[in-house]
Amino acid sequence: MECRRCGAPAAYISPFSGVPLCDRCVAAVVLRRFRRELCRASPRRDERFYLLATGDRTETLVALDLLIRVERGFPSRVTMVGTRLLDPLRAAALLGEGMAVVPYSLESYLADRLARLASGDLAFPALEGQARVVYPLSSTPRAEVEAYARVRGLPVTRARYPRIVTMLLKGSPTSLFAAKRFFGNISRIPAKPGI
Ligand SMILES: [Zn+2]
């Protein structure tokens, strides 16, 4: 199987287009998508980014690598903040100034949202309202995050997701994006005071 773009041996079939791609071409797509998602959040020229290090080493290091590459040439600053013991969204709300970057892949983003629903934590739209928070990897499937990590020589750790996310993963990629859109719409509901 050859990469449809460059002819190198392909290790990956895009779940969206069904096109075989090599790691390098996947990594290029991941970089482009990351840049687009970050721009959409309208960062300032001299932005202060706080990358929230979640428990997932691969996603955190990939997001850090991408953030540094995308922001090269800008007078912005990147700081990594450990949030292993703290909910990333609560950490983002505490940071105040600056833009919080949460490194979740598509699957991790969904796992986080489903866990909040399951535990009855419906405060996340309010928390997002208190922080400037961006999820620039949340349209990128985990397999593509891992391909990027391999190309850049970053460690690839095994991801574990709750059963409901694994079930969603067995469905079509469209169902993952439909689920993501659903949570995106919830996040846009204006928070009422006291919630
Ligand atoms: Zn290729």
Image (tube, rainbow, N blue to C red):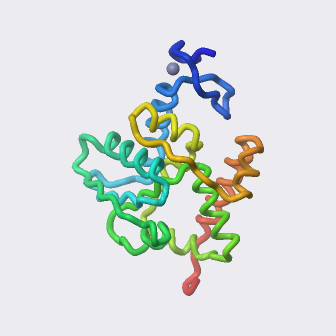
In the rendering, at what x and y percent does residue 144 appear? 55, 37
The quarter of the rendered structure image containing the C terminus is bottom right
From what the image shows, is residue 82 above or below residue 68? below
Q: Residue at x 58, y 39 (%)?
A: 143
Nearer to the camera, 117 or 9: 9
In this view of the protein, which residue sits in the foreground, 27 or 40?
Answer: 27
* Residue 165 quadrant: bottom right
Residue 19 image-quadrant placement? top right
Q: Is residue 2 left or right of residue 44?
A: right
In the current view of this chain or complex, which residue is farthest to the top?
Answer: 7
State the residue at coordinates (39%, 42%): 66
Q: Front-most of 42 and 139?
A: 139
At a point 49% along the width and 54% down the height, the residue shown is 56
70 to the left or right of 106: left
Please determine whether, in this image, residue 1 is positioned above or below residue 153. Answer: above
Task: Residue 151 in the image: state x and y as whole percent.
Answer: 43, 31
**Picture residue at 54% right of the left edge, 75% below the top:** 126
Looking at the image, is 118 positioned above or below residue 42?
below
Please provide percent x and percent y for residue 177. Answer: 67, 47
Judge whether 156 appears above or below 121 on screen. Answer: above
- Please identify the residue farthest to the bottom as the structure is shown: 194
Q: Quadrant of residue 17?
A: top right
x then y, percent, for residue 61: 40, 48
- Please identify the quadrant where the N terminus is shown: top right
Instruction: Indicate left or right for 64 with 177 as reference.
Output: left
Q: How many marks?
A: 0
